[in-house]
Image (tube, rainbow, N blue to C red):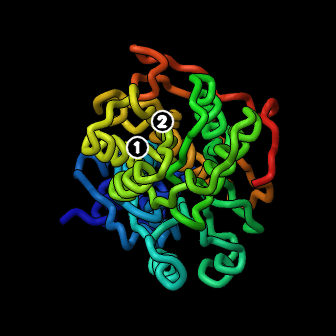
Amino acid sequence: MVTIKTVARDAGVSVATASRALNRPDLVAPETRRRVREVAARLHYTPHGGARSLITKRTHVLGVLLPDLYGEFFSEVIRGVEQVAQREGYQCIVSSARQRGPTLEAALRALRGRVDGLILMSPEFTGELSRRTLPTGFPVVLLNCPPSDTPHDSLNIENYEGAYSMVRHLASLGHERIAILTGAAGNFDAEERLRGYRAALRDTGLPVAASLIMPGDFTEAAGEEGTRALLALPQRPTAIFAANDGMAVGALSALRAAGLRVPDDVAIGGFDDIPMARYVDPPLTSVHVDISALGERAAVALLAVLRHPGRREFTRGTAATTLVIRRSCGAHDHEGRRPTTPKAALPRSSP
């Protein structure tokens, strides 16, 4: 087995110099660095991960902690993160903390020492929890998390704007009873989408009826169950806005089982525009989020923190949304796109 000692001997340098040439090349003269790397390549030398970590104080691993790993949304986020990570010579450890409280804290503690930084999506993450579980200055990028006192970079989807645009669009088609299948209770994305739904109804002069706000949890089963409950109302809705595409797929199933036609009897709109959205029947009108790009941006932000550990300024980024109009809403027979209403033009109605 080829070791760093073998590389150093054949390159005519000390073991320490060979190690620096491979792990801290900025500390070694260009000619020495070139010679050591040529020898390493010729001998097919592969650094030992544990030994390399001891030298560099880095694992070259990024952590990704999500509330769940099921569904196209999370797989697309992971795909985006991994594309950037692998391009930059990093690997990923992906985990989930679906339950609140101790589960999240245990997951954070388990990742300590195993990753150089963390991309975290959790409505439970607070400054107090960060101080209790993570070392001071540990690199973290928050993804779709509520505003907090944590000193970390963050990236959020324009949830309010996207939901507002979808409901205004459904209202423009003449729908007056527009229901919503909400996301999980306590989830930041879900709360913002519900807030956009309520604001759009108020601004179009439509009532915000409690009976049309159906609790969900972002799963297909919740969309199906919630839609059945909406159809049991004395006066059913003529349009349903599902807070994500998974629930919209469940809603389509429930409507089909009830013998109702989409969009003739009930129009449907979703959120996220997962890859499956264009292939269901009818194709789903949805608020498009470039989910893979979301993961890419989070990874780029985390690597920037790793490269500048002493930085004191933190970025607060947003991911824009686009309304994608397909046949499920009844507006067009072909796909059309338009940006959601610019943020500056949106009224900031209270919940």
Residue depicted at 38% across the width and 72% down the height: 51
Check the picture and name the quadrant holding the N terminus. Answer: bottom left
What residue is rendered at 24% in x and 46% in y? Answer: 42
Give SS at disc 2.
strand
292 and 350: which is toward the camera? 350
Dot 1 falls on a residue whose secondary structure is helix
Task: From the top left corner, tell me how far across and down residue 229 is, in percent.
Answer: 42, 56
Q: What percent of the width, then of the height, locates residue 115? A: 47, 68
**Image height check: is 301 above or below 46?**
above
> Can residue 235 be seen in the rendering of this structure?
yes
What is the x, y in percent for residue 116? Answer: 52, 65
Up-down relation of residue 279 to residue 71 (above or below): above
Give the residue at mark 1: 248
Of 42 and 120, the residue lying toward us:
120
Left or right: where 3 falls relative to 8: left
For mark 2, what is the residue?
Answer: 269
**Left-right relation of 312 to 10:** right
